[in-house]
Amino acid sequence: MKTFFLSCLSACFVLLAGCATPEYKAAYQECSPGAFSQYPEDKVRSFEMRQRWIQVPTGQVSCVTVQDASHSKQTVCTPIMSMSSITVMEPVIVDRNEEPRRRLISACTQSLCVQRFGNEDCKPPLPLPMPAGQPPVVTTPS
């Protein structure tokens, strides 16, 4: 169970990796264990409607005539197929606590970001620009 929790946590973290700041990712990781404690995985078997693509014959055929070494001709015909979607009931495993856990993690993460950075994205404040015409202050160790 613990390894599954860690793999789910890792998967969630990977989803965030694309556009979140390192500070946001840290806050997200900080909030996740508590959310998993409050909303543990509750996996149930369910059925969902899913779309599947299958090949179906169009009613047309494509024929090719070939001649072998003994000069006899043979015609080979194959049906022309097209793709068609069908809807099927498919068994799936669903975590009934996934949505409330995700909302709790999101709210907790945003709250930590506001507390620490003053914004919901954990974006650190930008340094103040130097006034025009003044050289930067450089300090050297003594």
Image (cartoon, rainbow, N blue to C red):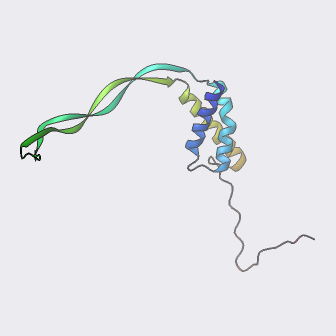
Q: Is residue 142 left or right of residue 11?
A: right
Quarter of the rendering containing residue 37: top right
Quadrant (top left/top right/bottom left/bottom right) for the N terminus: top right
Q: Position of residue 104 (x, y in %)?
A: 61, 32
Direction bottom: furthest residue: 133
**Residue 116, relative to residue 51: is it above or below?**
below
Q: Position of residue 142 (x, y in %)?
A: 93, 71
Q: Position of residue 59 (x, y in %)?
A: 12, 35
**Residue 141, relative to residue 25: is it above or below?**
below
Foreground of the two, 35 or 3: 3
Foreground of the two, 81 or 77: 77
**Residue 85, relative to residue 92: is it above or below?**
below
How many numbered dots are placed on residues in this image?
A: 0
Direction right: furthest residue: 142
Q: Position of residue 52 (x, y in %)?
A: 32, 32
Direction front: furthest residue: 70
Q: Is residue 21 left or right of residue 80?
A: right
Q: Is residue 94 left or right of residue 6?
A: left
Direction left: furthest residue: 72
Residue pictured at 60% horizontal, 33% vertical: 7
Residue pictured at 65% horizontal, 46% vertical: 24
Quarter of the rendering containing residue 102: top right
Foreground of the two, 100 or 19: 19
Residue pictured at 70% horizontal, 38% vertical: 30
Q: Is residue 112 left or right of residue 70?
A: right
